[in-house]
Amino acid sequence: MRAFQRLCIAAVTLFLLLTAVLDCLLLREQRQADGQYRVEAKRLADEITETGSFDLSHYPHITGVYTGEDLYISDAHYVIIEAGGMLYRVEYTAGSSCGVLLAVNGAAGLLLVLLCGGLFYLWRNIIRPFGSLREVPQELARGNLAVPIPEQKGRFFGKFTWGVNLLREKIESDRQKELSLQRDKKLLLLSLSHDIKTPLSAIKLNARALENGLYTDEEKRLAAVRSIHARADEIEQFVSEITRAAGEDFMHFEVTQGEAFLRGIIDKLHARYAAQLEAAGTEFVIAPYDDCLLSCDADRLGECLQNLIENAVKYGDGRRIGICFDRMDGCELITVANTGCTLDERELPQIFGSFHRGRNAEKIRGNGLGLFICKRLMTLMGGEVYAEIRDGCFCATLVVKKA
């Protein structure tokens, strides 16, 4: 705000300074123009003295020469000269710089009003609204989601503040979902831990009885063994539930199913990665395809393709990344392939699991969630994703239903 005020003061001061300089130049020009008629009057007197006649075409500032009875009768600007023993009234045109000076200063005043109005408009519609929002990002970064965001109705910041409010609501919603998820997980773990204690106690009792030889009857020993197996199965089931809860429910996905044209999705993908990959020296090839209408969430499908391309960039050799297309059973198959695959084919069944990273990713930063997210999103959209290794290339294929 202070910087803008200093800018306004500097702009107005500079404008007034330039106007003053222009006025000085115009006044100087006016003085020069006013002195010109005196020079011509002197030349005219010399001409009359020498020749007894004169030619007004040689004197652009003189409009008439009079003598005798009309010597002092005039409403125009004039000067009296003496030539050849006679007095002459020489009329001349006065300099018009005064009018020009007034016009210039009037125009400068109008421009000054427009300049001040423009600066005030900028301050009111851009600078002041922006100043009221400058603390919002810091507060959001600190986790203060209750920071007040003033509503703006102007066309410049109205949509921006609306978007910031949506962002804040989304962060708050995600936080609430995360807290709810963490609470549910803790309750689940506490419940399962309590449930595990019962079969575990039974296993320990039966094992101790068998160890101490309390069961002399073979039938009772077999019953104890069967009881241990049954309780072990219960514990295994509880552990599976814990694993499932820890492995699948840590992320929440929302999909808005709709319809989208394949060309629109591919065009956005090309616009995002073509220049980037070209600068990196990677050949980026999109095979010819027939446009069609897909049943999907366009944003989520684009996210899946972006994840596949990011994986191709990280784990490929950087020579070539290609996208090809096929059709099968009313579905569009979109395959992202990259050269330089070093993944062991035996790891293919595990690569779509959460936090799974192949042995070829030991020196590459990542969290092992890209393919997991693709799998979940494609499942929610009613599609599928699978991977294979062909001719040293890693190929990941999205199966998308047609609308």
Image (tube, grey):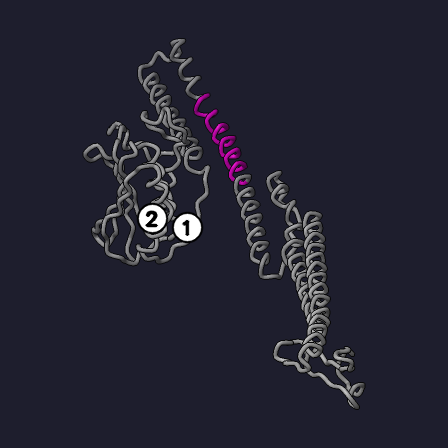
Q: Give the Cα distance between marks 2 and 1.
A: 23 Å
Q: Is residue 380 magenta?
A: no
Query: As displayed, is residue 99 above or below residue 359?
Result: below
Q: Nearer the viewer, mark 2 or mark 1?
A: 2
Q: Quadrant of residue 45?
A: bottom right
Foreground residue, 219 or 399?
399
At 36% from the left and 27% from the top, the residue drawn is 233
Q: Which residue is mark 2?
A: 270
* Image coords of residue 310 (percent x, y): 36, 38
What amino acid is labelled 1 in the image?
A: Val
Residue 181 belongs to magenta span: yes
Residue in front for this viewpoint, 387 or 265: 265
Magenta-tinted stretch? 180-201
Quadrant holding the C terminus: bottom left
SS of the residue at dot 2? Answer: helix
Q: Which mark is residue 255?
A: 1
Look at the magenta stretch and give its main secondary structure: helix
Whether residue 70 is situated above or below residue 340 in the rendered picture: below
- Taking the image as shown, residue 73 lies to the left or right of residue 226, namely right
How would you rate the neighbour count of disc 1 (Cα within 10 Å): few for under 14, some for 14-19, many for 20 or more? some
